[in-house]
Amino acid sequence: MHINCRRPISTKISKKISDIQLLLTRLSVDILAVTEIWLNDISASTLKISDYTFVYRYRETAAGYGGVGFFIKHTVSFQLHDLCPSNASHVTFDSLFISIS
């Protein structure tokens, strides 16, 4: 299996969704990791890119900064893993784990 992955530098992803869509199309990326997404459940639900699933974890702070996510091509089988307890609130880092098969 060949998987093509990338991780661009991003901040406030909702303002860069057209750039991300272009990147995914031009580079034929299977998985794109993004950081500093600055989203919550409401704003994340509006991020739609054809042929990709967006999985994410946002930082639960009042400021709304931080957060990480993956755009995963629909042809890639993956499983999301919650390795951090739900009561663990990290203020210094964000993490999201997937396994692919």
Image (cartoon, helix red, strand yellow):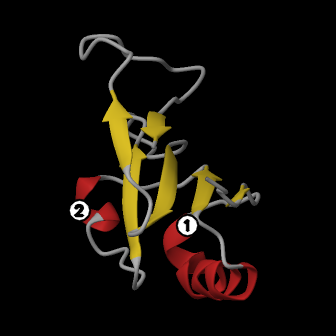
How many marks can you see? 2
Location of mark 2 (residue): 42
Q: Nearer the viewer, residue 50 or 39?
A: 50
The answer to whether residue 38 is above or below residue 65 is below
Furthest residue to the front? 1
Q: Position of residue 37 (x, y in %)?
A: 53, 55
Q: Position of residue 87 (x, y in %)?
A: 25, 11
Q: Residue at x 61, y 53 (%)?
A: 1
Q: Residue at x 51, y 20 (%)?
A: 91
Residue type beneath disc 2: Ile
Location of mark 1 (residue): 13
From the viewer's perspective, tell me whether residue 86 is left or right of residue 74. left
Which label's residue is closer to the chain start, 1 or 2? 1
The answer to whether residue 51 is above or below residue 40 is below
Q: Position of residue 82 (x, y in %)?
A: 33, 24
Q: Residue at x 47, y 61 (%)?
A: 72
The answer to whether residue 46 is above or below residue 77 is below
From the viewer's perspective, tell me whether residue 29 is left or right of residue 57. right
The quarter of the image holding the C terminus is top left
Residue type beneath disc 1: Ile
Kindly state the secondary structure of the residue where label 1 is placed. helix
The image quadrant of residue 51 is bottom left
Q: Position of residue 30 (x, y in %)?
A: 58, 65
Q: Nearer the viewer, residue 52 or 12?
A: 52
Distance between the alpha carbons at the discs numbered 1 and 2: 14 Å
Q: Are marks 1 and 2 in contact (CB under 8 Å)?
A: no
Circle number at residue 21: none
Kindly state the secondary structure of the residue where label 2 is placed. helix
Q: Nearer the viewer, residue 51 or 89?
A: 51
Q: Residues within 10 Å of mark 2 (few under 14, many from 20)?
A: few
Q: Residue at x 64, y 56 (%)?
A: 3
